[in-house]
Image: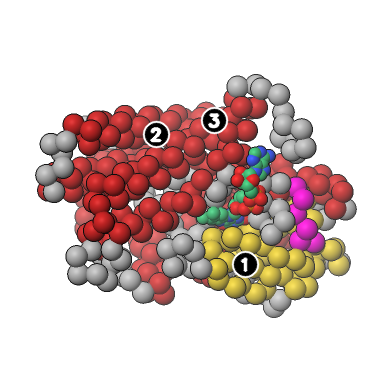
Amino acid sequence: MTLPHAATSGADPDQAFRAGLRQFLAEHHPGRRPNDPGERLAWTKAWLATLFDNGYAGPGWPREFGGMDLSFAQQVIYHEEVARARVPGPPGTGVGIAAPTIIRYGTREQKQRWLAPMLRGDKVWAQGYSEPEAGSDLPSLRTTARRDGAEYIVSGQKIWTSHAADADVFFTLVRTGTQESRQRGITYLVIDAHAPGVQVRPLRDLTGGHQFAEVFFDDVRVPVGNRIGEENDGWRLARTSLGHERTAGAMSQAEMYRRVLTELEELARERGLLADPLVRDQFVDLEIRVGIIRYKAQAAIGDILAKGEAGPVSSISRLLITAFEQDIHEFALDLLGPVGLLGKSAPQAVQRSRWLHGFLRTRASTIGAGTREIQLNTVAEQVLGLPHEPGMPAR
Ligand SMILES: Cc1cc2nc3c(=O)[nH]c(=O)nc-3n(C[C@H](O)[C@H](O)[C@H](O)COP(=O)(O)OP(=O)(O)OC[C@H]3O[C@@H](n4cnc5c(N)ncnc54)[C@H](O)[C@@H]3O)c2cc1C
């Protein structure tokens, strides 16, 4: 297949790539996001299939698995254009988190079996790491996988599993060693979400949505061929995923927030609020921060291209983005005053209550993908070289 973005002649190839992508996004745009969750998932999947089938999926992925393998400059352009077009991203957390681990540690057969259907949106992947007693201290996880011939038998519970209700596949960390073995007794296992013994119970979040769920495994049989890497070596593999989780989407989030900030400025202008110097001062602060976030996200893409991993610096990106998204929504509510607190069904609700929804949604941003305190510890120890915190697992 000749990829559309490979065809460049004469003019600056990066500009030609941008023009081609922009035209493609305009011509194939999926239209407005459906409100109904089921319709929304089908709409998202149809869009990802369109991207994949036309060679426009996976900007950083190897071509042999359906990706684009773009240069640094074109990955940046890709994220800018996709954010500008307001099209949906991949459903689930597989593309950003599980895929880098599979690409690096999976067997050839696993790569062929899993990667393209994940990128095309045919299969939704969700991350089953956290448990009720194992969040920040993940090495204390208790979900067991007992070997029985060519299968593992998995029992236990995961929690806060984002997109679990839509998932076809869970990528999990399970205990194959003794409880005391902590991170030395953990295995990376891929589990069919529709297998007998898997139960998903949605959890309601602050916005009223059901973005995550509890997942129960009751003697679920999993083929040994679904194990990534060696038995008891899952912690090392998970560290790749965690680095990528913190980086995943940093560039697209940076571009999205660049756009959101402009939209908030327009709203403030419409309401005559930009005359206030304190308001303008806040906007300048947010402008500078979104610029720094974009710079850090670009640096992370550069690190992934050069070294294969974003490394501990990804925690800095995560800290900057999560603080920014909380602050911009809080500022928006301050700007709007009481009317900003109206729910979307109220006639006077501003922009269908998007700023209130964003405010509520982003309260959890400094918890997911590792809490703010854990990210600060990572920066302190692994970037600044400060002493390791006693009681926490060695990195
Ligand atoms: C929106 C959202 C989506 C999520 N999606 C997923 C998902 O898809 N898959 C998944 O597996 N998990 C997911 N999680 C779970 C998330 O990874 C955990 O909630 C997180 O790691 C914290 O674990 P915990 O909730 O058990 O809190 P705890 O680890 O019990 O922490 C409680 C408090 O203690 C602090 N603390 C703990 N240890 C330390 C320390 N050493 N130093 C300083 N402070 C510390 C924490 O910062 C926090 O404030 C999600 C969470 C959220 C909010």
* Residue underneath mark 2: 293
Residue 220 quadrant: bottom right
Label 3 or label 1, whichever lies nearer to me, is 1
| Quarter of image, res 183 | top right
Query: Label 3 to label 2, Cα distance in Å?
Result: 12 Å
Residue 86 percent coordinates (x, y): 28, 54
Is residue 177 depicted above or below 210 in this figure? above
Among the 4 quarters of the image, the one containing residue 295: top left
Highlighted magenta segment, given as a residue range? 139-144
Looking at the image, tell me whether mark 3 or mark 2 is earlier in sequence order. 2
Q: Is residue 227 visible?
A: no
Give whichever of discs 2 and 1 has the lower sequence position: 1
Q: Residue 350, percent across and down?
A: 22, 59
Horizontal side of 64 relative to 384 (left or right) equals left
Q: Which mark is residue 214?
A: 1
Left or right of 229 on screen, residue 320: left
Q: How far is mark 2 from mark 1, CA to CA?
A: 32 Å
- Which label sits on residue 313? 3
Closer to us: 199 or 26: 199
Looking at the picture, does residue 44 appear above or below residue 75?
A: below
Q: Residue at x 39, y 60 (%)?
A: 48
Secondary structure under the numbered disc 1 in the rendered image:
strand
What is the crowding at mark 1: few (fewer than 14 residues within 10 Å), some, or many (at least 20)?
many
Question: Where residue 142 sits in the image (x, y, percent)?
Answer: 78, 58
Q: As shown in the figure, which amino acid type bears the numbered disc 1?
A: Glu
Name the residue type under label 3. Val
Asked if residue 152 shows in the view, the reply is yes
